[in-house]
Amino acid sequence: MNHDPLGNPDIGVAVEVRALCKVFTDPRQQEIRAVDDVSFRCCEGEIFGILGPNGAGKTTLLRMIATILSPTSGSAFVGGYDVLSQPDEVKKRIGFLSGSTQLYSRLTPAETVRYFGRLYGMRRSLIEERSRQIFQVLRMESFRDRQWGKLSTGEKQKVSIARTLIHDPSVLILDEPTAGLDVVSSRAIVDFIRNARSEGKTILLSTHYMTEAEEMCNRIGLISGGRIVAEGTTQELLSASGAASLTDAFFHYVGGDGP
């Protein structure tokens, strides 16, 4: 039986990161530690936020957990499976949403989601059933047969989320899911994330929006310079820093390197 960070012994650990590091080499052959000795646990049915400014290491961290990048050192596990030695098992259990995802401009949302479903080896009937459910939840019916290249930014993001969900993953890894969206589209994505949590999904969410992290996340890891500088619930972060707001707490821990 696993013990989660919130103190409930009946909740398992869905994602575990142990001393994860990623080092890149710049053109001058100097090392850049994009992620530096990061460790944390995310429990089943929890939204764990990675909150930090652009360039803090959020995307690199999530890409390692999603098996897209290999760590320089350290380890990470999803559902008990090692991202390095068991990547196929990890991929079955995750849905990864990147803010830089570009889909096929000539395909419609329905065709795009069907294509990804086939990549996961799903039966055609199951793909159609899941697509209907997802399109209804995300309110995509009105543009399901319009080419992706002709959609708005918010509509494109919904298509990306739909293809992330088609195989019904237990863990969602969402990298800046509302970046660049208008207020209406952002609210729709936030509502979707909350609904996913209510269905028991585990969610890793990176963001640089303080309000978004405070409203949605059960716990938050503050990241700066590739390191987790503080971790806890919003109230724990406020109490430990003596700050009146999450923004003030962030600046307490990272100084002037704000979002």
Image: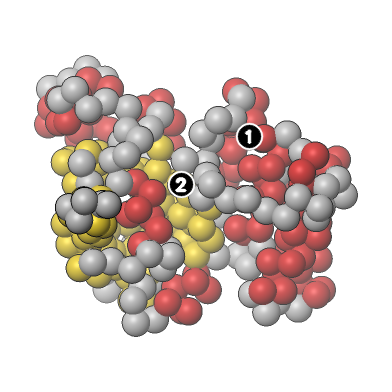
- The residue pinned by badge 2 equals 175
State the image coordinates of residue 243 (x, y, percent, origin top left): 17, 20
Residue at 22%, 46% in the rendered image? 226
Mark 2 falls on what kind of element?
Answer: strand
Residue found 64% across the figure and 31% down from its top: 185
Q: Amino acid at mark 1?
A: Ala
Pinpoint residue 162: horizontal percent, then vertical percent.
67, 53
Would residue 77 be seen by someone viewing this image from the given angle?
yes
Camera-side residue of 48 and 143: 143
Can you say whether 108 is above or below 250 in the image?
Answer: below
Q: Are marks 1 and 2 in contact (CB under 8 Å)?
A: no
Q: Which residue is mark 1?
A: 188
Along the line of sight, the residue nearer the viewer: 63 or 117: 63
Number of other residues with Cα within 10 Å of mark 2, as a class: few under 14, some 14 to 19, many 20 or more: many
Question: Taking 189 as reference, is 31 left or right?
Answer: left
Image location (x, y in percent) of residue 138: 70, 44
State the residue in front, 178 or 226.
Answer: 226
Q: Nearer the viewer, residue 258 or 134?
A: 258
